[in-house]
Amino acid sequence: MYLDLYKGLRLRPEDLTSYDSPLVGFDGKIVILKGKIRLPVQAGSEVVEVDFIVVDAYSPYTAIVARPWLHAMKVVPSTQHLKVKYPSGDRIEKLVGSQSMARQCLVAAIRHQGGGEPSAPSGQGL
């Protein structure tokens, strides 16, 4: 979880527990860790407790969920379709991502790194 979201949720610094494992960002740089916190995450009608590592780094995203959440929810992800499906009671629910929002996040991340506007290969969009 990025610090902006942590502050936006009005969580206090004293709610964090220490977390001392090194973390390297997508750009290869060491990320400043603030600590760890366990929070409930709701997806549809399901609620699962998830441990978040809080980091002080730039990101166009608010949080990145990892395998523990995927396993706890029994999620089947499809990055190609920007969807996750998971069992809920006697039915299958799904969460659908936004291709345009994913593109905006990618553009923001590239601009932040000083790379300018990304270009997709001919005939392919993000």
Image (cartoon, grey):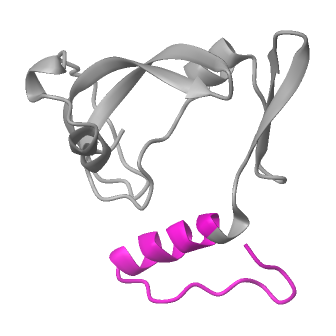
Which quadrant of the structure image shows residue 101?
bottom right
Determine whether 64 is above or below 57 in the image.
above
Horizontal and vertical percent position of residue 86: 80, 24
Verify whether residue 27 appears in magenta: no
Residue visible at 71% across and 83% down in the picture: 120
Horizontal and vertical percent position of residue 66: 55, 30
Q: Is residue 81 left or right of residue 114?
A: right
Residue visible at 83% across and 54% down in the picture: 80
Residue visible at 83% across and 90% down in the picture: 122
Which quadrant of the structure image shows residue 77?
top right
Number of numbered discs on residues: 0
Horizontal and vertical percent position of residue 111: 40, 80
Give the camera-side residue of 33 and 45.
Answer: 45
Q: Work out which residue is located at the far top of the displayed protein and give it.
A: 89
Horizontal and vertical percent position of residue 10: 20, 36
Does the rendering let one see residue 102?
yes
Determine whether 53 is above or below 124 in the image.
above
Verify whether residue 120 appears in magenta: yes
Residue visible at 32% across and 36% down in the picture: 23
Q: Work out which residue is located at the far left of the displayed protein and give it.
A: 14
Q: Is residue 105 left or right of residue 86?
A: left
Which quadrant of the structure image shows residue 3?
top left
**Span highlighted in magenta in the image:** 101-126
Which quarter shows the N terminus? Answer: top left
Q: Is residue 78 left or right of residue 55?
A: right
Give the camera-side residue of 65 and 95.
Answer: 95
Which quarter shows the C terminus? Answer: bottom right
Does the rendering let one see residue 77?
no
Q: Is residue 57 left or right of residue 118?
A: left
